[in-house]
Amino acid sequence: MYSQTLCLGLAARGHDVHVFTREEDPFRADGAMRYETDADDSRIKLYIANNPRHKDRYRLDAIDQEFAKASDQVKPDIVHIGHLNHLSTSLVFEAKKRNVPIVYTLHDYWLMCPRGQFMQMHSEDNNLWAACDGQANKKCATQCYARYFSGAAEDREIDIAYWENWVDRRMTHIREVVDQVDLFISPAKYLKSRYEKDFGLPIGKSIYLDYGFDRQRMQHRKREVEDTFVFGYIGTHIPAKGIHQLIEAFGMIEGNATLRIWGRSRGQESNALKEIADSLPGGKSKQVEWMTEYKNQQIVEDVFNKVDAIVVPSVWVENSPLVIHEAQQARVPVLTANTGGMSEYVHHEVNGLLFEHRSVDEMSKQMQRMVDNHSWAAELGDRGYPFSESGDIPDIADQIIDMENIYKGLLA
């Protein structure tokens, strides 16, 4: 969503914008290309590489070659990377062969964590989606890549050695990729600091710049009158987002409240979440409502007009969630965890409430405070974004000017 907003803003300023991205079509060859234009601005050209079978690799020659062809055709002045996962890390070398400066906006931990979120798939104490305190090759092998082990006890040490070596090669390669990038942008000071401290990202090529938004999309919120306090969740139905804990926390609060969950159905994952909701005591399951996917252009009408608070219950340490900013612009209070970029943008009892990360009990207690005092919750929402006098989040028009200056500096 941010990438599209940025591209639209650049195109509106007269820049020639081309987007190299990917899709997963299992009925077409890997590396096959498709070309179209952005749905909202036909000036923006899309180069879509197919990658259905090799998406778990970190580099792919076929995609590097297509990126090279696109680069020779477009002759870009700047390459700005939003993510390389499921594409190819080594396409940065193609840009550098052509002496093109590279900007990389960091959105998660994928460069310093092979799986991107510092969450373990197989923890030693069998804790589902346990938090990881840092990257280490053998730990990555045993805690995350054990899913690829043979399963035979006699093969375990062989499997560990293989995946430990794989992770080591991946991390060595990533260091070479990082060397090619001229500037990294972090949308949270927390993320910037973590990359510098834990990964050794050079301070000289690391800056902070929060996301920019099309603020018009979040204007004119008017809360629809209801006789219940409504909590809302917006996002993907995956374990990292912590929806399971949100449902459990909601089941513990007292009083007249509703939980509305927006997002595209993901089959078994969504069904499993609905089963958790169905198991809530005291008929609470009837107060959990499953909403359809919404369009971001209609987020106020479809979401913010129908909630009294937004909950961001992520069990991974997010850095600068878009939904937090969007809710703040619409003056909806946010309840989230006291860690990472989540607590960087939500200040406890100022523009929202914080709870102990991964604690269902603490999340429930803070939700209860909002249910018990509707007007106070609304006052928290009125504060908006904590880093502007007006409470307004950064505007994309201002960010485009900042980005132009960044590009000019690199070109100089």
Image: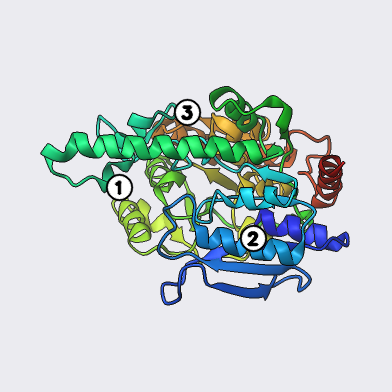
Q: Which residue is mark 1?
A: 281
Give the x, y percent position of residue 385: 73, 39
Q: Residue at x 69, y 59 (%)?
A: 4
Crowding at dot 2, Cα within 10 Å, few <14 / some 14-19 / many 20+, comes out as many
Q: Quadrant of the N terminus?
A: bottom right
Amino acid type assigned to the residue bearing label 2 in the image = Ala
404 vs 202: above or below: below
Q: Residue at x 35, y 57 (%)?
A: 269
User: Where 384 sits versus 223, above or below?
Assistant: above
SS for callout 1: loop
Using the image, tell me which numbered label, if any, was put on residue 356.
3
- Closer to the camera, 81 or 229? 81
Q: Which mark is residue 68?
A: 2
Quadrant for the C terminus, please: top right
Q: Are marks 1 and 3 in contact (CB under 8 Å)?
A: no
- Answer left or right for 337 relative to 396: left
Position above or below: 85 against 363: below
Distance from Cα at disc 1 to Cα at disc 3: 24 Å
Q: Amino acid at mark 1?
A: Pro
Q: Secondary structure at mark 2?
A: helix
- Horizontally, residue 74 falls left or right of residue 261, namely right
- Mark 3: which amino acid? Glu
Q: Earlier in the sequence, mark 3 or mark 2?
A: 2
Does the rendering let one see residue 375?
no
Question: Closer to the camera: disc 3 or disc 2?
Answer: 2
Image position of 168 with respect to 297: above or below: above
Residue at disc 3, secondary structure: loop
Task: Count neighbours of disc 3 (C-alpha within 10 A) and say few if under 14, some if 14 to 19, many if 20 or more.
Answer: some
- For marks 2 and 1, give the CA distance: 58 Å
Residue 60, image x, y percentages = 49, 56
Disc 1: CA contacts within 10 A as few (<14), some (14-19) or many (>=20): few
